[in-house]
Amino acid sequence: MEENPISGSATEEISGRWAAARAQPIGKAYRDGTDRAVSPATTLARVSPAMAAAGITRVANVTGMDRIGIPVWCAVRPASRSLTVSQGKGVTGDAAKASAVMEALELWHAETHHLPLRYDTHRALAARGETVLDPMTLVRCPCSEYAADRPMRWARGWDLIGGRPAWVPYEAVHCDWRVPVAPGDHAVQNGSNGLASGNSLLEATVHALCELVERDAIVAAQDAGDLLAAPRMVRPETIADDSCRDLLGRFRHAGVDVLVWDLTSQIGVPVFNCLAVETDTPWYHPLPQTQGSGCHPRRAIALSRALTEAAQARATVIVGSRDDIGRDRQSWYFDPEQRRAVGDAVRDRPRRDYGQAPDIDHRTVNEDLDWLLTRLTAAGIGSAVVVDLTIAELGVPVVKAVVPGLRWRPWEE
């Protein structure tokens, strides 16, 4: 681990890397259910050499395990230090396959300890004039043992709002979930929230920030009791996007009710949550009720992500291979009381138009990032630190974003 503060050369290196990444406009050549610089097929071709290094032994199409027909794929890494099975979804088979592979790759990057780290206390770092995130401003684990004079591991990131390097608790960055934990851990909540990959550093960063905003909006709605509230429920007939209407039609054709809520928070980035449920399934053949959520400057993409995630969750529960679905979580999917509550919600009259959600359609990924940072700053967020996890030899851009003030709950991942 590094024992010295961030040196001038290190500051110049990280500053130059981000300046170079933001200097070149990145267009959006692929816009079917997502905004990407290249098509999913091209992404798969680019990252396929990294799959063996990451321990991916199998990529499988599990769409047919359910009857909805929305593409769902999985990628398997038997030697994983976190999840051995990663899921992917999309409006096309290639998009779902790329989603699964990229999720597996980003987790592998976050499990692999390749970053230069500091082992120090928050108090000592701050006293030396370092820019350092205060763990008290992050989501802390229930058993937090944090103290300002307790040494812990720190990783270096780049504060996109402050425009300078910053130290972040490494526990908020990595996804190595083996035990026993390293000295100094059990301070902040560890998880994959804010972990993202992409075709470029900026593309990965946009998707990481969107995930953080999405999870924060869900927590805000839960705390306000609005998660299933009728005033936020979207009238399906007002959804004008053809791709989203097609996804809704697939659910409907399969006999699955889908409820959609607009959970856009004060940050102003579109967030949708949806619930897919069969209220009249017989007791002897229950099927899971599942949720999906999505966030993106374009509301159609935010909704598409929510719908495809709900379909992905159904297939995941049916397949039964996901490591993080324990007995308690499994019970929720089939809980009759929850199903009855959903039935009551179905009978509520939706009151919100889809068009009430914001909708920002930029030409470049750069503009998306600038707009997201503007929205975060307007909401009172003072730091948005991104740790670059990319391994140059593999060439798969992966980041972990950490934004103090944005909340999440690990069981919602």
Image: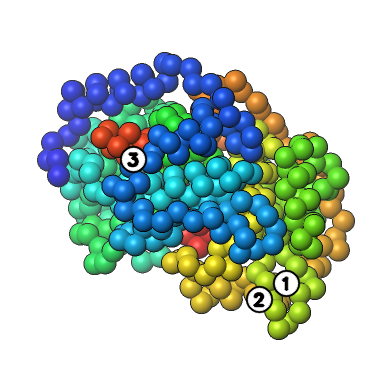
- Viewer-nearest residue: 117 or 192: 192
Q: Amino acid at mark 2?
A: Asp
Label number found at residue 339: 1
* Sequence-first tag of 1 and 3: 3
Snapshot quadrant of residue 131: top left
Q: Farthest residue to the bottom: give it.
A: 284
Colour option used? rainbow
Q: How crowded is the residue under tag 3: few (<14 C-alpha within 10 Å), some, or many (20+)?
A: few
Whether residue 365 is visible: yes
Mark 2–mark 1 CB contact (< 8 Å): yes
* Position of residue 359 in the picture relative to residue 34 (left or right): right
Q: Position of residue 185 (x, y in %)?
A: 27, 58
What distance separates the C-alpha of mark 1 from that of mark 3? Answer: 44 Å
**Disc sitting over residue 269 in the figure:** none
Dot 2: element: loop
Residue type pointed to by label 3: Pro
Q: Amino acid at mark 1?
A: Arg
Mark 2 crowd level (few <14, some 14–19, many ≥20, 10 Å Cα): some
Query: How much space separates mark 2 and mark 3, taking CA atoms?
Result: 43 Å
Q: Which residue appears at 36% of the width and 56% of the height?
A: 57
Left or right: where does residue 165 sit relative to residue 83? left
Labelled disc at residue 335: 2
Q: Secondary structure at mark 1?
A: helix
Residue for point 86% across, 63% down: 347
- Find residue 83 and report its horizontal and vertical position in percent: 40, 60
**Quadrant housing residue 90:** top right
Relative depth, front residue between 386 and 47: 47
Residue at which label 3 appears: 49
Determine crowd level at label 1: few under 14, some 14-19, many 20+ residues with C-alpha closer than 10 A: some
